[in-house]
Amino acid sequence: MTRSPSHDRQPHQADTGLSALLPEGAGGDDVWIDVLSAVDRTYADLVDYQERLERQNREMEDLRSFLGSILSSVSDALIVVTRSGTVLETSASVEGLTGRPGAAWHGGALAAMFVPDAAPALDAALAEAANRRAPVTIEAALRGHDGPAPVELSVSPRMDDRGRIAGYALTGRPLGELRQAYSELAESHEALKSAQAQLVRNEKLASLGRLLAGVAHELNNPISFVYANAHALERYAGKFETYFEAVQQGAERAKLMRLREELKLDREVRNLREAVQGAREGAERVRDIVEDLRRLSAEGTGEMVAFDLVDTASVAASWVRRGSKAEVALVFEGLPGLRVIGRPGHVQQVVMNLVQNAVDALENRPGGRIVIAAAIAGGRGQLSVRDNGPGVSDEDAAAIFDPFFTTKPVGRGTGLGLSISHKIVEEHGGRLRLCTDGEGGGDGGACFRFDLPLAEAQ
């Protein structure tokens, strides 16, 4: 029997290619479309992944370049180590300190970079930094090309993403530079102190200059009194010499009685005592004025001593009043005595500045009145100076203690009085301030108050 040609086709010819994988009855065109779509998606994902890789590579290169520029530019020595103490990175400045390229230390032990004596302190600093999770500062010496190179080393722990210690970062600055910087800072501080002392002296001289007229008047009165009594004593001495000369010549009693009556020796004896007493009082007054001047011109930079704040304020206020032409009433209130700790010369200058400002504010104002009050508040001695003048505006109050700030006309003030006074009180551990509205005492003027430590329990 003859077969049809269609039955002579081999089975493997119909089942070759992707069609053999397709399920029976599936359409070939639809499957090819799905396959091509899957290939397109896969290729797109590969392209996107490649772009991300390239972008991340660029970012890593930028970061590497950035870190490299930092490591090459920092002046302090920077050493990055693992948790076990293996050196990973070093800054370019390490080469300048050790004389060896930074790469020569990479992969080696951290202790090898330092002198043997520094190992215990270095190990202790790493352990403490890990325990505290905070920087620890020590002094250690690197192996320098000319011998040990001491540095001030700050050891800080490095954390990973999970907050665990991954290693340490050590930064060190040569101690020679630090000590030089400290020396320059100390010199600057001394220069500042010297300039401040000079300002204090200049302001004190300015205060003395304003008081010269009062000083001359105060000295002229007792000296004139002494001079007049000295002339009287000279006249009395001449009369007594005449009488005693007659006695030595053997004059008769009657003649001596007449001479005594003519010379009025009985009255002159009484006058003699009064003249001596007057001369003594005048000399004592001169002595007191000189003592006040000595206290006022004292340097005041010595040790703190115990002194009576009320007495010092009284002397300072009296000097200002002597040099002032204004008719101002000066009143003391509060404690009659208050012993505090400080430098009397400087505190006296503070009170003089405050009283002088009050006098200037009351110029050409009738009924001017200055009240100085001493009290104890908060366990400290307190002194306030207030007046019934125009007061201080809110705008001026904000800058009242600034150097060279003044509301006085040109040539009447330096603008340094309150600034220096504020600094002096701060050096005594106190504070000079402008009183608030409720502390002014109701006079409507300005009120300044400062406090000092008490000398004893009062």
Image (spheres, rainbow, N blue to C red):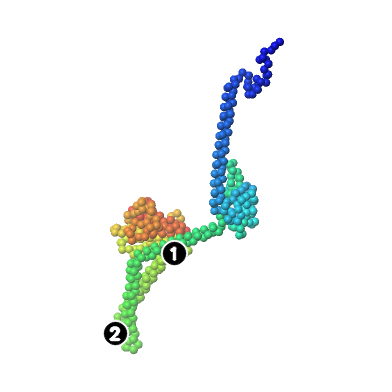
Quadrant of the rendered image containing residue 292: bottom left
User: 45 or 4: nearer the eye?
Assistant: 4
Q: Quadrant of the C terminus?
A: bottom left
**Residue furthest out toward the bottom:** 250
Which class describes the residues within 10 Å of circle 1: few (<14), some (14-19), or many (20+)? many
Q: Are marks 2 and 1 in contact (CB under 8 Å)?
A: no
Left or right of 389, for residue 70: right
Q: Quadrant of residue 256?
A: bottom left
Image coordinates of residue 310 in percent, x first then y, are: 40, 61
Q: Residue at x 32, y 82 (%)?
A: 238
Report whether residue 32 is seen.
Answer: yes
Viewer-side residue, 418 vs 266? 418
C-alpha distance separating marks 2 and 1: 64 Å
Residue 405 lies in what quarter of the image? bottom left
Q: Residue at x 65, y 56 (%)?
A: 116
Mark 1, residue position = 300
Q: Left or right of 16: which side holds 44?
A: left
Q: Is residue 130 visible?
A: no
Q: Position of residue 452 (x, y in %)?
A: 44, 58
Q: Which mark is residue 258?
A: 2
**Kind of element beneath mark 2:** helix
Amino acid type, mark 2: Arg
- Residue found at x 54% / y 58%: 177
Residue 90 x/y as whole percent: 59, 50
Instruction: Please name which of the two marks, 2 or 1, marks the residue nearer to the observer.
Output: 1
Which amino acid type corresponds to the residue marked 1 in the rendered image? Gly
Q: Is residue 327 above or below residue 62?
A: below
The one of 195 and 389 positioned closer to us in this rendering: 195
Element assignment for label 1: loop
